[in-house]
Amino acid sequence: MSATTPPGTPPPIGAVVHPVALYDLLSVTVLFFVLIWFLRGPRAAGSAAALFTLWYAGGRVGLDFLRTDPTRAFGLIGTQLASVVVIVATGAWLLVRARRRGADEQATKAAASGALASPASAGLAASEGSPGQGAEDYDTP
């Protein structure tokens, strides 16, 4: 865009503009390979979807600064505003999930240490008997 064209106005015919769709294609191609690498190991449920969402929405915010669309609010265009909302929502979901996972791990550790020290669990283990005890009752037709 030329220096005399105000931001948010369409460029004049014949003006050179950024090929934002090409940049988006390159970004998503890199994302594809990042996701393949990311999914090679075990991941928590939803991690790949969160990675995709954050990468793509972040890319939209960045790439859309190169567009010539009129701004809507806070100097951003509509797709940037929507992407910011998606980024905030995904970030909040990741924080809630991380806190729940931390609380679940603490509860599991507490339950495991409590179960090992419990006299009731020791009595239950002793009453089970050896494997195969009583099996002779089931062998006869």
Image (cartoon, helix red, strand yellow):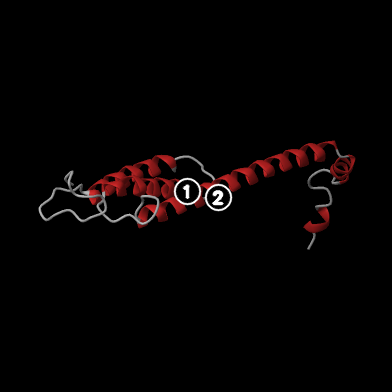
Question: Which secondary structure, mark 1?
Answer: helix
The residue beneath circle 2 is 93
Depth check, front residue: 51 or 8: 8
Q: x, y percentage for residue 105? A: 68, 41
- Quarter-wise, where is residue 113 in the image? top right
Count the labels in the image. Answer: 2
Residue drawn at (81%, 40%) of the image:
115
User: Circle 2 sits in a helix, a strand or a loop, which is it?
Assistant: helix
Q: Is residue 106 left or right of residue 64?
A: right
Q: Position of residue 122 (x, y in %)?
A: 86, 40
Q: Residue at x 20, y 47 (%)?
A: 18
The label number, if any, that marks residue 3 in the structure image: none
In front: label 1 or label 2:
2
Left or right, 96 with respect to 9, comes to right
Kind of residue at badge 2: Trp
Q: Are marks 1 and 2 in contact (CB under 8 Å)?
A: yes
Q: Residue at x 63, y 43 (%)?
A: 99
Residue type at numbered disc 1 = Ala
Q: Residue at x 51, y 43 (%)?
A: 43
Is 84 situated above or below 102?
Answer: below
Residue count near mark 1 (Cα–Cα under 10 Å), binned few <14, some 14–19, many ≥20: some
Q: Is residue 16 left or right of residue 100?
A: left
Residue 33, image x, y percentages? 34, 42
Q: Which of disc 2 and disc 1 is earlier in sequence?
A: 1
The quadrant the C terminus occupies is bottom right
Image coordinates of residue 76 in percent, x first then y, are 36, 51
Q: Residues within 10 Å of mark 2 (few under 14, many from 20)?
A: few
Residue pointed to by mark 1: 50
Front-most of residues 103 and 92 = 92
Q: Residue furthest left?
A: 14
Left or right: 21 with respect to 112?
Answer: left
Q: Using the numbered discs, state the Cα–Cα distance from disc 1 to disc 2 in whole angstroms.
A: 9 Å
